[in-house]
Amino acid sequence: MSEKQRYFIELAYDGTDFHGWQVQPNAVTVQEVLNDALYTVLRQPIETIGCGRTDTGVHARDFFLHFDVGSTVNSQWSMDKQAIGPGPSTIDLIKTANSLNAILPNTIAIKRIIPVDAEAHARFDATSRSYEYHVHFNKDPFKINHSWQLRDKPDIALMNAAARIIMEHTDFSCFSKSNTQTYTNNCKITRAEWVYSKHCLVFHITADRFLRNMVRAIVGTLMQVGRKEIQPEDVRAIIESKNRSNAGTSVPACGLYLTEVKYPYL
């Protein structure tokens, strides 16, 4: 069995043209494009594990994945992919990052490659994740696919009052996409706040973990509060119901950004 070295990659991507992070059939994803680039540069099969998954159209300013580099190539994979030889178990970090950036599309950027312990895990070792959701109110061609345009400004004070109520809870079943096969719907939220800046609204949220579709469902529910369709206290009953149908509609993916992922050893 060959010795392997594990690496983290920190990257950013514009999710507009991708069907999310995770490889899936008949759709172009960030993971698929990156895996192909890694194969081209390292000349061996690479399996990447991301810090999470993002949906179609969602962006990431900060995303981590891990992969292993070994000294031999799996023979079946080599036959299928026509690998041209074994790759090294250690790599030149700067040269590899530059080589990947040279062949990746402009919508994906490698920030750095980091050697880590063999047991380090991009998904399970993350201690917190932060997202932003962007909203704007005036037509702006530079914000197409990167922010959600609204006509009327919601009441920020009411939305922040509701956001504080959300932070009092841990079971967010009401904000989760159904049939996600997660072991728990509990999350610890440490920040949930709307900030008005430069004629735009940005929702900041940080937690130890997130459920699928959770942030977009929270934003949709808070928008109901901001439009005075429901009261902040109604959010408490929605959360306690644990019923997705009681929460607001998921807002468009274009305004959502993964902005920070933290690890105890980075």
Image (spheres, rainbow, N blue to C red):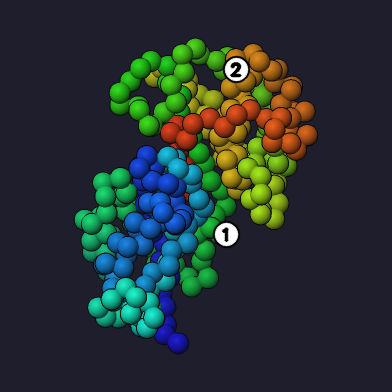
Q: Please give the label number shown on residue 226.
A: 2
Q: Please give the label number shown on residue 193.
A: none
- Using the image, determine if residue 61 lies above or below residue 43: above
- Using the image, determine if residue 190 lies above or below residue 71: above
Residue 91 at x, y = what percent?
A: 30, 71
- Report whether residue 200 is seen: no
Residue 203 at x, y = what percent?
A: 52, 29
Q: Residue furthest front?
A: 26
Q: Nearer the viewer, mark 1 or mark 2?
A: 2
Residue 52 at x, y = what percent?
A: 52, 52
User: Measuring 30% from the left and 26% from the top, which residue is drawn there?
Assistant: 142
Q: Earlier in the sequence, mark 1 or mark 2?
A: 1
* Nearer-the-camera pick, 193 or 43: 43
User: Measuring 33% from the left and 20% from the top, which residue is drawn there?
Assistant: 140
**Residue placed under numbered mark 1 in the picture:** 124
Residue 88 at x, y = what percent?
A: 31, 78
User: Measuring 48% from the left and 73% from the top, which residue is drawn there?
Assistant: 118
- Using the image, determine if residue 255 lies above or below residue 139: below
Tag 1: Cα neighbours inside 10 Å, few (<14), some, or many (≥20)?
A: few
Task: Give the residue type at disc 1.
Answer: Phe
- Report whether residue 15 is seen: yes
**C-alpha separation, residue under disc 1 versus residue under disc 2:** 35 Å
User: Measuring 32% from the left and 49% from the top, which residue is drawn there?
Assistant: 108
Task: Give the residue type at disc 2.
Answer: Gly
